[in-house]
Amino acid sequence: MEITLTNSNDADALEFPWGAIKWLCNDQIDPEAEMTFGVVYINAGEGNPTHYHPNCEELIYVLSGECDHKLGDEVIPLRPGMMLRIPRNVKHNAVNTGWQPVTMIICYSDADRQTVFED
């Protein structure tokens, strides 16, 4: 049996002007993986760009902080303990509405998560 074991304390962060992502499982970390899994944070007052995933759905679970997640024309306020499923091809983005970073676990149904950013 082959397993994947990663530690977010040891993972490299991909830094962005709005926050950062640490990938803990995907096809680059484990070629046998069937999903993508990571931790993301968005800085206070910031938001990630509008985007969608053509090859997978996304699950978001809020660990701390708060944000508004926009899916199409709908805005969904998210708080700690809440989970949101975003279907494939749905344009979305999150904006931190609190004073501290919002930290979320993110999971995708494909190990080779594809992301298309809106122009």
Image (cartoon, helix red, strand yellow):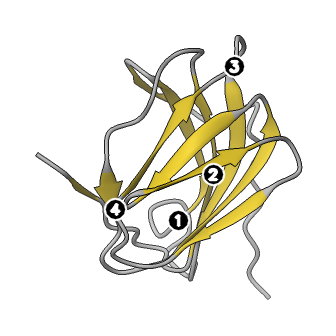
Crowding near the residue tagged with mark 2, few <14, some 14–19, many ≥20 C-alpha atoms within 10 Å = some
Q: Check the image and report above or below for 29 versus 97.
A: below
Q: Which tag, 4 or 3, sits closer to the chain's start?
A: 4
Which residue carries the number 1 mark? Answer: 26
Whether pointer 1 and pointer 2 mark residues with C-beta atoms closer than 8 Å, the reply is: yes
Circle 2 sits on which residue?
38
Q: Determine the image quadrant of residue 43.
A: top right
Residue 118 is left or right of residue 101, and the answer is: left
What amino acid type is highlighted by mark number 3? Answer: Gly
Residue displayed at 37% across by 18% down: 17
Q: Nearer the viewer, residue 84 or 12?
A: 84
Q: Which residue is mark 3?
A: 98
On-image quarter of the C terminus: top left
- Height in image: 100 above or below 70? above
Of the image marks 1 and 3, the number of the one nearer the N terminus: 1
Q: Nearer the viewer, mark 1 or mark 2?
A: 2
Which badge, 2 or 4, comes first in the chain's sequence?
Answer: 2
Camera-nearest label, 3 or 2:
3
The answer for how far apart the CA atoms under marks 3 and 2 are is 22 Å
Which badge, 1 or 2, is on the more N-terminal residue?
Answer: 1
Q: Amino acid at mark 1?
A: Asn
The residue drawn where x is 62% and y is 31% is: 41
